[in-house]
Amino acid sequence: MIGTWLLLGVAITATSFLSGVFGMAGGMVLMGLLLLALPVPAAMVLHAASQMTANGWRALVWRREADYWVFLRFCVGLLAACGLLFSFQYVPDRVVILFCLGIVPFLAVLIPPNLLPQANRRGGAELCGLLNTLLQFVAGVSGPLLDAFFVRTPMDRRAVVATKAICQTTTHTVKLLYFTNIAGGGHEILTAPVYVIAVATAILGTSLSKLLLERLSNAQFYRWTRWLIMAIGVVYLTQAFYVYFTR
């Protein structure tokens, strides 16, 4: 049991650090790791708890840099998605989640700029809130798609990380409520020590990430983010095909 908790703590610390630097990616890695050990509802709940904490702490650390008008508009789309999702009470299959994790990075990159309004433009934040919330409930993460709404804006990297952190905190909170109350959430697996470890290590990883983010230039930030997400997408597509053809 102690060994399991230790591995969980290391995984969440590392992935929270990754998300703290690039504003995403860590959640994708953590979702895949949790799916290896937990049923889908339990994985969704623990992922939501850790990512809600990591993003919330990141939002607090960079609160002065955030664009709150973009966030408020994001919430309009989020509320519309919640109305749809809570009506259907959908719980995704493990293979569906893996395919989504693998495909989303490529879709986000390949979408023509004129078809995807940026978060700071008219209708961009609202559409971002709608699509990202829907994806959170199907794949557990939405970082690459969320990033697509910010990557071509003139916003500074700190503003991008801060604003995305607030948006992600909100969507993970909704996901936590959904899978805890509607899908069961694996209460017999997710004991109090597990939540304590998830919260504490999420804060630790996020706090450490600030040191590296300060050293990156805007050009390095955007270039490394794209290649990192593409690499993670390839890994998950490979895993999805393997699970599908061997189950």
Image (cartoon, grey):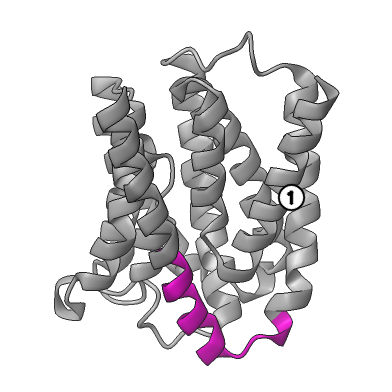
Quarter where residue 226 is shown: bottom left
Measuring from the top left, give residue 10's x and y in whole percent.
76, 45
What amino acid type is highlighted by mark number 1?
Answer: Thr
Residue 82, visible in the rendered structure = no
Say above or below: 86 vs 77: above
Does residue 217 show up magenta in the picture? yes
The N terminus sits in image quarter: top right
Q: Quadrant of residue 135?
A: top left
Magenta segment's dominant SS is helix
Residue 56 drawn at (x, y percent) = 65, 51
In the picture, which quadrant includes the C terminus?
top left
Q: Which residue is most to the right? A: 2
* Residue for badge 1: 13
Whole-percent x and y of residue 112?
A: 16, 76
Q: Which residue is pictured at 78% across the width and 45% down the height? A: 201
Q: Nearer the viewer, residue 169 or 144?
A: 144
- The region drawn magenta spans 214-229
Task: Give coordinates of residue 72: x percent, y percent.
Answer: 43, 58
Q: Is residue 145 magenta?
A: no
